[in-house]
Image: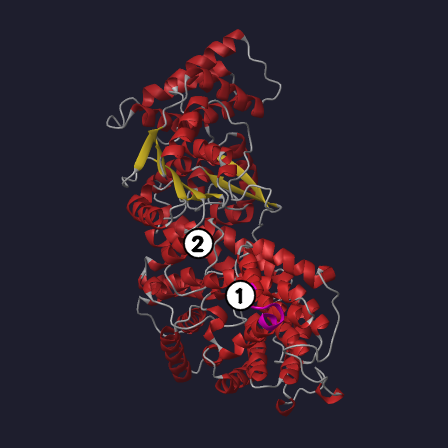
Amino acid sequence: MRHLQRRSTHPDSPGLHPSSPARTTPTRDAPVGNVPAELNRFVGRADELAALRGLLEEARLVTVVGAAGVGKTRCVGRVAALREKRYCDGVWLTDLSPVHDPGLLEHAVAEALGLTDHTGRPPRAALVEHLRGRRTLLVLDGFEHLVDACADLVRELLCRAPGLRVLAAGRRPLLVHGEVTFTLAPMCEADAVELFEERARTVRPEWQPTATDRAAALELCRRLDGVPLALELAAGRLRALSVEQVLLRLDDRFRLLTGGSRGAPPRHRALRTAIGWSHELCTPAQRLLWARLSVFAGQFDLEAAEYICGGVGLPADSVLDVLEELLAQSVVEREDTAGTTRYRLLESVREYGAEWLAAAGDTGRMRRRHRDWFLGLATWCELDWFSPRQAEVAARIDSELPNLRRAMECSMESPEEVHLAQHLAGSLWFYWAGCGRPAEGRYWLEHVLEEPTPYDASRLKVLWVLGYVAVLQGDPVGAISALQECREEAERSGDSTALAYAIHRTGCLALVTDDPARAEELLRDALGRYREIGELNSAVLMAQVELAMAVAFQGEPDAAAAICEEVREVCEDHGERWALAYALYVLAYAALRRGRPGQARRMLGECLTIGRTFDDLLSTVLSLELLALVTAVEGDGEEAAVLQGAAGRIWPSVGLQLFGSVHFGRPRAECEEWVRRELGDAAYEAAVRTGRRLERGAAVERALTAAAGGGVRERRDTPGAGPGSEPEPGPASEPGLSSEPGGGGTRRPAASRMTGRGGPERW
């Protein structure tokens, strides 16, 4: 974890990395947070819920403990939903069951909070800053395998964020000072019978229990000790059996397991009995699929299940039918999100299947198949990032992150397979840099480099991606170290692709450290090399945008616009949106310098829309800063100051404000000088404070409304009106008229041969 301890000494890179896929920001009237809606009726537990609500009023840390399957997750979720309106800054649920590495704990909590931080500071510092001053309820579920790391994190967050309360659920207490522990017992008989009958009707809606059925159900609930998971598994069997048959088979299973696990608590034995009994009632094909599905971490989809789990004893074309049978028996859960259908195993069910897979001696083979599938997925997504499907790719990687982590872990277990982990980590460059995950990206990139391996294409790619991420984190020492090593080894081995990327990323570093002339030299060199090897993708387009920025910072906005017009054309041809947002930012900058604020406003509106799609903090905050200057030019100084305040609230999560760069800071400085002169210091500061109170979603909505023409004053192009404007250019300096270096543009990189998925054929 040493990369997380480095202090950021340099700013982020402009136009380099959008954040993760869009997260919806609720309106002020709606509850804030991510507690999911309940998919079926919550049954019983009235006394327990009342007790937990009371404890949360008195204590800042309440931990619900109990046996596996006793209903801890459902209870804390219910309490959280009932308390949403009590916490103005939200109720946020973090499922820690898929997180196996303690080093990823902070990343998981930050992800659940919707926190995107592009700085080089440790994730824990970002969490503390985010939660400090907020009234928030953080729900931590399934922490028992991370108890030490979780206790340490909770202790620090509670000490440094006075408005924070934590509701945790696990099999053991955290043992943090001030913790109040609530032991969740199995359901009482009345609640247990009600739950069993409620779930039974979901599988057999026509079922009308007779007196005999009710007596059998009561006995069943007693024998299962009122454990909710066991009851739900039993209810799932009513699709094929009567209640009496379920009870009879359960009685057989009890006798079979009486001699085992004597040291385990009775309730744990009851849950294991229920799972084992459900397993015994499965067909051989169902048991086989259950065991093989245990290799997944978190959710999975049908295609992955068919590839990984299909094979000897279970043909791939039969997986769907068997999966449906496991769904019907409540062994597998279905989760529909964003128009896609995914599945998961409850953790206790997954662990049971993993034991059977190990007993069959098939764990290693299945883990390798799992690794191979997700290695292919990452490669495919890297290709598809340069296509109209960018937002879908970002969402897909986001949902598959637990499985991708497990795939890298699998490859790191064998020295002969480390190169596969390197290939996977490098292929995800667009996610680490483009979807707001530089900190976790650096964790994996450094981890896969720890094992000495030959300097093949995979290792060289990891080096330049690591250098890129270090640039984003403001760590020039780390960036230069990785990029120089990559460049030297690429020259020695003749890897022209790695060499081009190393030079490109070195140019990025020069750009954000206020050396635009050096940046231009390096970026033109990289673009020439990209043309020679036929490389064309989102990274190449970003090199052109960064070149345009370097040119603009040297006083040639028209030449910068010409470069970005080329980028915009290529983006439109390929449906690319990520690089387009930054090209639009440069074009808006140039339009404003030409005295066309109305045109700049429209471009910035599109840039903000794209940024919201990707939840891209960098393009969003840059656009807000420039839009503030546009607004000042158009005569609405108060709104300009509000936008500056809103941007100021976002910058700490991105990095050093405006990268500490004189060039990037010029629009803000001009805007502040103009508005202070117009409004006076007191009115300016008051408007800035108003902007700082706006949540990011509200600030973007306000800016988009203004960009669409809904501002306070009429929006129009006014050449020469206000700061930032320059005389109207003549025809020779209009964008797109020159592609020669002397004319300020660059030739478009030679197109690569493309596959059907929009990426170079060599990938």
Quarter of the rendering containing residue 710 = bottom right
Q: Judge whether residue 244 can be spotted in this image.
A: yes
Whether residue 22 appears in magenta in the rendering, the answer is no
User: In the rendered view, does 430 fall on the left or right side of 478?
Assistant: right
Marks 1 & 2, CB-CB < 8 Å contact: no
First in sequence: mark 1 vs mark 2: 2
Q: Which residue is mark 1?
A: 618
In magenta, the rendered stretch is: 675-682
Say which residue appears at 53% left-offset and 79% top-offset. 663
Q: Nearer the viewer, mark 1 or mark 2?
A: 2
Name the element at disc 1: helix
Estimate the x, y position of residue 209 in percent, counting from the top left: 55, 13
Q: Which residue is mark 2?
A: 130
Tell me the crowding category of disc 2: few under 14, some 14 to 19, or many 20 or more residues within 10 angstroms, Cα based.
some
- Closer to the camera, 439 or 332? 439
Quarter of the rendering containing residue 547 = bottom right
The N terminus lies in quadrant: bottom left
- Closer to the camera, 650 or 278? 650
User: In the rendered view, does 463 fall on the left or right side of 40?
Assistant: left
Say which residue appears at 70% left-offset and 82% top-offset. 735
Estimate the x, y position of residue 562 in percent, counting from the top left: 67, 82
The kind of residue tagged 2 is His
The kind of residue tagged 1 is Leu
Estimate the x, y position of residue 734 in percent, counting from the top left: 72, 84
Q: Disc 1 versus disc 2: distance between alpha carbons?
A: 17 Å
User: In the rendered view, does 606 fall on the left or right side of 165?
Assistant: right
Instruction: Say above or below: 490 vs 378.
Output: below
Residue lying at the far top in this picture: please name it: 211
